[in-house]
Amino acid sequence: MATAAPTAPAAAGDDAPAPVDNPRPRWRGGETRAALLFVAPAMVGFLAFFAWPTLRGLYLSFTDYDLLTSADFSGLDNYRRLLEDEVFWNSLWVTLKYVAINISVQTFAALLLAVLIHRLTRSVVLRGIILLPYLISNVVVALLWYWMADYNLGVINEMLGWVGFDPVAFFGDESWAIPTIAMVNVWRHLGYTALLIFAGLQMINRDVYEAAAVDGAGEVRVFFRITLPLLRPVMALVMVLTVIGSWQIFDTVAVTTQGGPVDATRVVQYYIYDQAFNRFDFGYASAISVVLFLILAGVALAQLKLLRADESDQS
Amino acid sequence: MRTTTPRRSAPRHSVPRRLVAVAGCLSLGALLSGCGSALGDDRNTVDYWLWDANQQPAYQECADRFEEDNPDLEIRIEQRGYDDYWNGLALGFVAESAPDVFTNHLSKYPEYVTRDLLLPLDEYVERDDVPLDIYEEGLADLWVGEDGRRYGLPKDWDAVGVFYDRAMLAEAGVDESTLDELTWNPDDGGSYEELIARLTVDVNGVRGDEPGFDPDRVETYGLWLEMTDGFNHGQTQYSMYAYANGWEATDRNPWGREFHFDDPAFQETITWWRGLIEKGYMPSFAAQRGVQSSDQLAAGNAAMVTNGSWMTGTFFSYEGLDVGVAPNPIGPTGQRATMFNGLADSVYRDTDNPEAAWQWVRYLASPECQRIVGAHHVVFPAITEAWEIAREEFAADGIDVTPFTRHVEEGTTELFPITDHSSEIAALMQPALEAVMSGRAPVESLNEVNEEINRLFE
C-alpha cells in the first residue's frame, strides 16, 4: 500500500514521454508476488498461532466451556459475571500496581544506565555483562530471589540483620509481595531495556553534541535539552514494549507466591491461568483474556499517540 | 542527517517481530511438552504417569517384573512434578493423548468422572475375580464414584504425624516417651500446647513457658506453620486437631454435598491454631512462606513440624539432624485423629489398549507389586501385608513409623473429603484461610465462604 505512493507523482508529470509499453507495472507485479512469497512463512505462523487462537478465544469467551466437553454458547454470561467478580477487579488493581512499580523503576534505572554506558565506555564486554540477567531463565531468576529473600533462611534478611533491621517477609507479607516481585523483574530486564535505549542513543547525531559543547552546555543541560527529546521515539517504543510485557507478568508469580498471600499477588494473567487450568473454566478465562487484550491494545495506542512515536524531532 | 530517518525505522519493526517469534516458540514449546509424551500410538505400549520421583524406582521394578511376565507389553513410566503433573494430564485429555494409566488423587478424580474421562473398571474386576478385601479397610471404596462405578484400584495410603528434632527435646528436658500421651483441646491447648511453649526459644534463650519470653523475637518456634502448598483440607495443618475435636468436614463422606466450615468445632480449632502465632509459638503467616517445613526443622527454626507419612524419607535424610516421629495429640473426643488419604491407579477412557492398561493396573494393585513398593519403603502400600513390609524396612533403618500405622490399627482415621467441585472449593478456601491466618479477617469470615461453597452443590 505504501509502495504505491512514490509512483504517483512520476506518472503525473506532464512532460514525461508516455512510453508505448511501460515495463514497470509488470515488474511491480513480480515484486508483489516475491514480497508475498517472503511474507508467507511469517503470515502462516501469524494466522495459525495468533489470529486463529485470538478469534477462537473471542468465541470461547461467549461460551461455557470446560476444555473437556464441548462448548455451550452462553451469550454475555461470562462478561456479566466479570463485572461482579471482586477477585477479577482486585487482580486488575494488583497488576496495575505491579506495572507502575516495575515500569517506573525499570525505565528510570535503564535510562540512567544507558546514558552512563553511552558517555563513559565503549567496552563491549561491559555491555554484555549488563545483559547477563536477561539471559537467565525467568523461573531460575524467580527461584533464586525467592530463596535469597526467604524470611528465615535467606541471605538478604541475614544481611539486614547485620545492620540491625528486623527480617522482612518479602514474599509473605501482603504489602511487600508485589513490590518484591516487581523489583525481581526490574533486576532481570534492566540490562535489556538499557541496551534498547543505548541503541537509541547511538542514533542521535554526534554533531548535535558537538554543537552543544561549542555553545558551552553542561552535561545535565545536554541530557534534558538534547538527549531526552531526541530519544523520544525510541523511548516510546521501549515503553510500549516493556509496559505490555509488564502487564503480562505471570511466571514470577507462578513460581513464588501463586497469587498469595491472600490475593495480594493474584495478577490478571495468573487469575486467567487459575480459571482455565485449575478450575477448567475456559469460557470465563477467555472472557478475562479478551478484556485484558482490549486494555493492552488501548494502553499501547494511547502511549503511541501521547509520545508521538512515529515522528522524530531529529531532521 | 536526513539519511538517519529510514535507517531508524528498521529496529522499530525488527524488535517486536523477534519478540513475537520468541513468544511463539515458547507457547509452541509448552504445547508440545504438554502432549509430547504419548506421541507413539503403539498398541503394545502402556504409558504410565506418577508424580513422586522418590517412588519411581519401586514402580520401575514392578514394570520390569510385569514385562517379564508379559513379553508383548512395554511399560513406559513418566514422572512429573505435582503441579505440572495435573496440567500435563489436563492437556493430554484435551489432545486425547493422556497416559493410558496414571496415579490418581482423591481431590481430582471426581471432576474427571463428571467429565467422563476415566474408564470404569467394574467389568474387568468382575471378569478377573480381583479380590477387593486385601486392601486396608475403606481404601477400595474410595474409588467408587457417585454413580456406583469403580474408577481405580488402591495403591497406597498415608497418615499425618509430628516430626521433631530430638536434640531440641533433650535440651528442653522433655522425655520422648511422654509424646505418646499428649492431649489437646481448643481452649488452652492441653499438654500439647505446653510442649510447644516449652520448645519455643526466643533470641535471649528464654523459653515460651518462662517469664520474660519475647514473642516478637523468636529464634526457634515450638511448632512450624506451613501453608505454601495450596488448600488440601488442612491435611497436614489443622485436620488432626479439628477431627479430634469432633468435627466432620462434610455431611457424609465420600460424596458429601454440604461443608461444615461454619461448625464451632472447626472454628474454635482454627482460633486456637491462629492463637499460637500471637503467642509466638508458631511463625506468622508472612514468616512461614519460603522453603519447606523439613528444611526449617533442619535449619533449627522449628522444633516440631506436622507433616505426612510420605515425607518420612525426606525428614530423615538431613545430615546432622536427629529426627523423631510422634503421634498426633489426643483431642476432646478422647481419641487422636489423622486424615487418611489413599492414591489409586486409574485408566484413561480413550486409551488405545484398554486390556493392556487394565492388566498393568491389576498388577500395580497386586500383592506382588505392592510388596516391591513396600520393600522400597517410601510410602505405605494399600495391601496390609505390603505396608507391614514397609514398616519393617523403616524399622531396619532405625525409623519407628508406628505413629502413622497405629492410626490404621486403632481405627482413628478420617477419610480425605471426597466431593465434586474440589478445585473451586480450593480456590475459595485458600485465600479465605490465608486471610484468617494472617490476622486480616476474623475466623467467622469462613461462614460466608462456607455458604458460597455449599451453593456450588445446589
Image: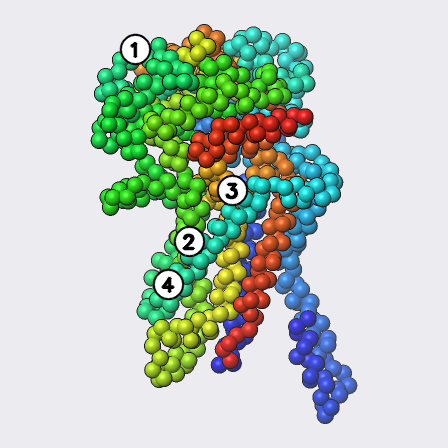
Task: Please identify the residue farthest to the bottom as the structure is shown.
Answer: A15
Q: Is residue B274 in view from this perspective?
A: yes
Q: Residue at x 56, y 32 (%)?
A: B428
For marks 2 and 3, the one nearer the N-term is 2
Crowd class of label 4 (few under 14; some 14 to 19; many from 20; radius 10 Å): some
Element carrying mark 4: helix
Whether label 3 touches label 4, CB < 8 Å: no
Position of residue A31 relative to residue B456, above or below, is below
State the separation of the CA atoms marked 3 and 4. Answer: 31 Å
Q: Judge if badges 1 and 4 mark residues of a common chain.
A: no
Q: Residue at x 55, y 33 (%)?
A: B427
- Depth check, front residue: A130 or B415: B415
Q: Residue at x 42, y 48 (%)?
A: A179
Residue A186 got which mark? Answer: 2
State the separation of the CA atoms marked 2 and 3. Answer: 19 Å
- Residue type indicated by callout 2: Val
Element carrying mark 2: helix
Residue B177 got which mark? Answer: 1
Residue A266 got which mark? Answer: 3
Which image quarter holds the C terminus of chain B? top right
Residue A41 got which mark? Answer: none
- Residue type indicated by callout 1: Ser
Q: Judge if badges 4 and 2 mark residues of a common chain.
A: yes
User: Is residue A126 found left or right of B438 in the rendered image?
Assistant: left
Mark 4, residue position: A113
Q: Give the percent coordinates (x, y) of residue A237.
A: 52, 64
Element carrying mark 1: helix
State the separation of the CA atoms marked 1 and 2. Answer: 53 Å
Position of residue A27 relative to residue A171, above or below, is below
Instruction: Report in which chain the residue with disc 4 lies.
Output: A
User: Is residue B233 found left or right of A172 in the rendered image?
Assistant: right
Q: Give the percent coordinates (x, y) of residue A162.
A: 24, 44
